[in-house]
Image (cartoon, rainbow, N blue to C red):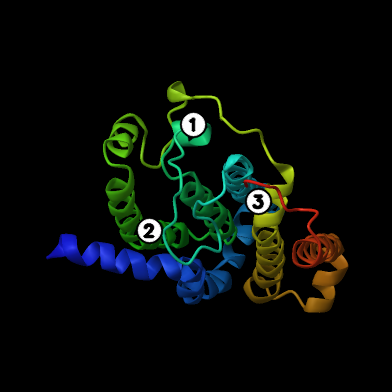
Amino acid sequence: MLKRELPQQGKFLFRWRGYLPLIMLPFFIIAIFQSGYWETYLGAAIEQSWAALSVLVSFVGFAIRVITIGYAPAGTSGRNAREQRAEVLNTDGIYSVVRNPLYLGNFLMLLGVFLVPMVWWLPVILTLAFALYYERIIFAEEEFLVEKFGDEYKAWTARTPFMVPRFTGWRKPLLSFSTRNALRREYNGFYTLVVCFTLVEVGTDVLGEGVSFAQWLENAFYWVWIFAIGTLIFVTLRTLKRHTSLLTVSGR
């Protein structure tokens, strides 16, 4: 019974996989209101170092996605795919060290944002929710790939870890890295991080610590510049993707 239900649940969740952050939003808001305690207790220097570490975690996840997409061939599932697709089985490059690099990247991107408030239970809840959510998606994907690629897929899964990379199995990618393909498919992820970290910074200071918005603008004006530059990059890449062929790469 469960083996029949999991693929069906996974197919549904695959189409709506981008909505997990919205499901987690109420927990995040609660954590924001608790965030002021730790800066008062630990001091601003440690809080800022923790924030920098959180940003680093998210951008490591983003880098994993960029590397994955930059080497990906055409006809594979990506950020905007609504159903399972795989014209070829990726087993080289980053796929030779981990089976689900895009989901690993997604998790780290979310984890970095959810670490910022310094509330211990928030990343724990995120990890549990992510595991339950994506377990079903991956179950459906693996059923699809077994049916399509058979023994080739089974042999790859036998030697390649599920989510934690094992670099001893590294195999050089067959394709060269495509910067244009990465820009075309991952600019949304970059801007999402810029927006999230800007909003979290405002939220933790204004809601968590009771700082007025005017005072926040005065003390953290660099975040306004980060947001403005991020928005400019987003609009530029979105325009190039929608109205030109500059980011289009044949076969990718």
Looking at the rendered structure, the kind of residue marked 1 is Asp
Kindly identify the residue that appears in the image at 76 percent across and 53 percent down. Answer: 247
Residue 206 visible in the displayed image: yes
Q: Nearer the viewer, residue 119 or 114?
A: 114
Secondary structure, mark 3, is: helix
The Cα atoms of the two marked residues, 1 and 2, are separated by 23 Å
Mark 2 surroundings: few (<14), some (14-19) or many (≥20) residues within 10 A: some
- Viewer-side label of 1, 2: 1
Q: Nearer the viewer, residue 214 or 111?
A: 111
> Disc 2 marks which residue?
134
Q: Nearer the viewer, residue 101 or 224?
A: 101
Residue 97 visible in the displayed image: no
Say which label, 3 or 1, has the lower sequence index. 3
> Disc 3 marks which residue?
55
Looking at the rendered structure, the kind of residue marked 3 is Val
**Which quadrant is the N terminus positioned in?**
bottom left
The Cα atoms of the two marked residues, 2 and 3, are separated by 23 Å
Kindly identify the residue that appears in the image at 65 percent across and 76 percent down. Answer: 207
Drawn side of residue 167 relative to residue 230, left or right: left
Kindly identify the residue that appears in the image at 27 percent across and 41 percent down. Answer: 150
Mark number displayed over residue 45: none
Say which label, 1 or 2, has the lower sequence index. 1
Q: Compared with residue 184, is residue 171 higher up or lower down, i.e. above or below?
A: above
Q: Position of residue 217 (x, y in %)?
A: 84, 71
Kindly identify the residue that appears in the image at 53 percent across and 48 percent down. Answer: 105
- Viewer-side label of 3, 1: 1
Q: Nearer the viewer, residue 228 or 36?
A: 228
> Disc 1 marks which residue?
92
Secondary structure, mark 1, is: loop
Drawn side of residue 128 relative to residue 101, left or right: left
| Extreme residue toward the front, this view | 250
